[in-house]
Image (cartoon, rainbow, N blue to C red):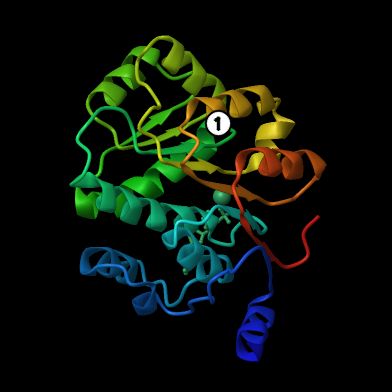
Amino acid sequence: PAQVAELRHKLGLKVTGVLPPHPVTSFPHFGFDDPLIKTIRKLEYTQPTPIQAQAVPAALGGRDIIGIAKTGSGKTAAFIWPLLVHIMDQRQLKPGEGPIGLILAPTRELSQQIYNEAKRFGKVYGIQVCCCYGGGSKWEQSKALESGAEIVVATPGRMIDLVKMKATNLERVSFLVLDEADRMFDMGFEPQVRSICNHVRPDRQTLLFSATFKKRVEKLARDVLTDPIRIVQGDVG
Ligand code: ADP
Ligand code: MG
């Protein structure tokens, strides 16, 4: 309807794909439970950022997402919050081993930032998070994986190494995030990213975020996402 188009325009969003949900511009309307709402309130976030307003309801609806927005637009929480809801939904059903959520990021620094954010919000549910990056101790990272991390934040090369070492398996991963996809490609991680996508079950939910949307990222999105909703904020290349 016209109001939805107007709202998206106001938020600076261009949205394409089959049946995207309406943007949601207030936290109470996301439908999160009290512990998560309280944590968000403590951070004094007054309202969702535009990318969050559109990506969160789409992700909560189980949809694959391509989210393109410049640095600083709040993309991390846009995938962490739905991932936490996804894990809480699965928890009663499936005891087992191996992470449920896997987030790939290009660098140690970025994976640690995501890890901190995942821990901050995951804490309210007692969700364990672990961070695996090149240069860190494989032994320590293996221990963290074995102790039952439900969310793993990893750089692609290290994730492959740890899977090869059988430190973990990705059979239970049903929520996959490719963060800063453009930078992962710039760093030469395309083969590793593709290999990991092939390891993870095909019926997973996949979210791809990037500051730019160049040909190679577009091609990856076509290969690894299913009927994605594409959300572009602002003028990005
Ligand atoms: P991006 O991944 O798009 O570069 P980040 O997820 O790192 O952006 O978020 C940038 C900053 O904005 C972080 O400091 C984060 O805590 C903050 N932030 C995220 N969501 C909100 C919000 N809804 N309101 C205010 N600040 C937010
Ligand atoms: Mg980011």
Q: Residue at x 71, y 33 (%)?
A: 185
66 is higher (above) or lower (below) than 170: below
Instruction: Indicate the position of residue 78 as horizontal and vertical percent values.
Output: 48, 59
Task: Report whether 97 appears left or right of 71.
Answer: left
Task: Report whether 41 appears left or right of 67.
Answer: left
Asked whether residue 134 is in view, the answer is no
Q: Secondary structure at mark 1?
A: helix
Q: Residue furthest toward the bottom?
A: 3
Instruction: Indicate the position of residue 62 as horizontal and vertical percent values.
Output: 45, 56
128 is higher (above) or lower (below) than 32: above
- 70 vs 8, nearest the viewer: 8
Q: Residue at x 46, y 41 (%)?
A: 204
Q: Residue furthest toward the top?
A: 165
Q: Amino acid at mark 1?
A: Cys
Q: Residue at x 39, y 14 (%)?
A: 138
Q: Say which quarter of the image contains residue 1.
A: bottom right
Task: Report whether 161 appears left or right of 51.
Answer: left
Q: Say which quarter of the image contains residue 33.
A: bottom left
Q: Residue at x 57, y 43 (%)?
A: 179
Instruction: Indicate the position of residue 157 as horizontal and vertical percent values.
Output: 56, 20
Q: Which residue is mark 1?
A: 197
- 226 vs 7, nearest the viewer: 226
**How packed is label 1: few (under 14 Cα within 10 Å), some, or many (20 or more)?**
some
Instruction: Indicate the position of residue 13 as horizontal and vertical percent values.
Output: 67, 72
